[in-house]
Image (cartoon, rainbow, N blue to C red):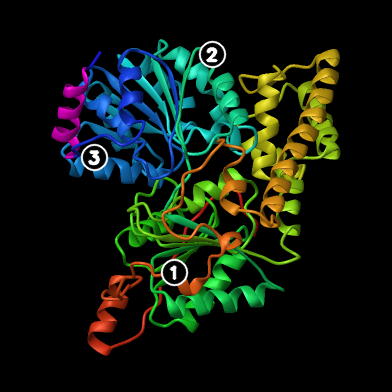
Amino acid sequence: MQHTPLLEDALKNYFQYTSFRTGQKEIIQDILQGQDVLGILPTGSGKSICYQLPARIQEGLTVVVSPLISLMIDQVKELKANNFKEAVAINSFMSPAERRSVYHNLASYKLLYVSPEILQQTELVSRLSRLDVRLFVIDEAHCISQWGHEFRPDYLKLSETIKALNQPTVLALSATATPEVQRDIIHSLNRPDMIKKVYPMDRENITFCVEKVVDDLEKTDLIIQLFKKYHVPSLIYFTSRAAAEKIAVLLSEKLPDRRVAFYHGGMEQMDRISIQQQFMNDQLDIVCCTSAFGMGINKPNIRLIIHYHLPLQLESYIQEVGRAGRDGESSVGLLLFSPMDAFIPTNMIKNELPDETDLANLFQQLYWMSKGDQAIDHATSEQMANQLQLSETQWRFFRYQLEKHGIIKNNHIFYQKENWQYVMESLKNLIKERTLYKEDKLNEVLAWVHTATCLREGLYRSFQSTYRIPEHSCCSSCGFIWSDWKPVETSANQRYFSSWQAKLQDLLLGGDSMAGEYAGEYNETK
């Protein structure tokens, strides 16, 4: 075990910090002793130190499962700037030659970032299994529960990967996980002896505000008035891509001195990363985005988080609003609510999972394909999804369940009448169960929005028994008014240009330029 003075020295030597934040040292000490740990720490508390420091001071390789390419790229870039050259991320942007080079030199790295999907590649797992993988980390571990069952089922296969890598020490990290989600993470990873390190997730410097309005027009007017008064880095969250684009364009027109962009799942990956980097570098003031934007972003001076639409669950809201005020300065989370707002998330929940008709059509198609021993390769999968009119998410859900129950093995269909009847009934029940679960989560959000008591207490009730005294105004239920808010503001001292051509045009002709690039996410509507 590392003694405390040695850990303090290592922290200062490698990361230039003089002391640990709450929970960091305790988690590091446990994993250095070989204990599996589930760490729940508030957003902005420096969770990455919990595995980056061990990766530097202990032998072997640390593998980090991360949900977003942009998040991996940022982490590796920051580590290399901090003279940690033995860090690398494997992602879809790599050329075949770059990926081969990393594969052939895996033994020279100390820290490897990958997505759960890439970890399903046989060649990579085979190479890793021959190395000394000392620590296996799941960053943003709530994704196992939040995304694993529908959007990204490869999260549910991580326990198999851990076994293939010779059972290294496991660290799962998240900022938001109810006791129920904690149990789901531990069960999915098959680590029953995992030590829980759960710390208060409330943020004393964030004020919570719910404003009830008549319609979207009133929402937009309120947002414009706020930005005319406050010049602060801000995020506006939407569940609709079209709305994010529309409001971004409108704000650019109404607020010519602000640099505005939008970010959603219909965009190219490079455009997403571009927007994220511009926001991080203070080249954008406002980003109209869907829910993935900001995950893992360590931008200290975000002051205002606005929710134009309802989040699907309180966990998502805490994650998103927690991106404000990481420097400890006064910040506000504003949720706007109109009577029609519940319809969008309700329809999203309804459309995320397949229904009983989809289930029956799928098994009929599989039956006929089994007669001809037709393989379910990538092309066939896409063709089936199109024929059955299934979304990518719905097909991904079906495919995982079919493989889990042995109906699809090695891309071939195995027909057994009794087993198929059992699986059909099981899937029917699972779909009902997951839909009810999501509806309950949405109802929790609606109940919170309509509460007449303290918003802070209601927000954290499911996660912890108490909360700390806020440093500034508590919430709109406890007397917060906008005239009381005096945030640290930023000045518009740097113009944003969408390309070098636009910058040249501005220099030569004094032309105008607008931030119209954008980026993406999973859980959103078009």
Tell me which amino acid carries mark 1: Trp
Q: Crowding at label 1, few (<14), some or many (≥20) Cα neighbours within 10 Å? A: some
Tell me the chief SS of the magenta region. Answer: helix
Question: In front: mark 1 or mark 3?
Answer: 1
**Residue at image point 47% right, 12% down:** 163
Examine the image and state in which quarter residue 441 appears: top right
Mark 1 and mark 3 residues within 8 Å of each other at the beta carbon = no
- Whether residue 110 appears in this view of the structure is no
Question: In front: mark 1 or mark 2?
Answer: 1
Helix, strand or loop under label 1: loop
Queried whether the magenta region covers residue 517, the answer comes back as: no
Queried whether the magenta region covers residue 12, the answer comes back as: yes
Q: Read off the residue under disc 3.
A: 79
Tell me which amino acid carries mark 2: Pro
Q: Earlier in the sequence, mark 1 or mark 3?
A: 3
Disc 1 to disc 2, C-alpha distance: 46 Å
Q: Read off the residue under disc 1.
A: 485
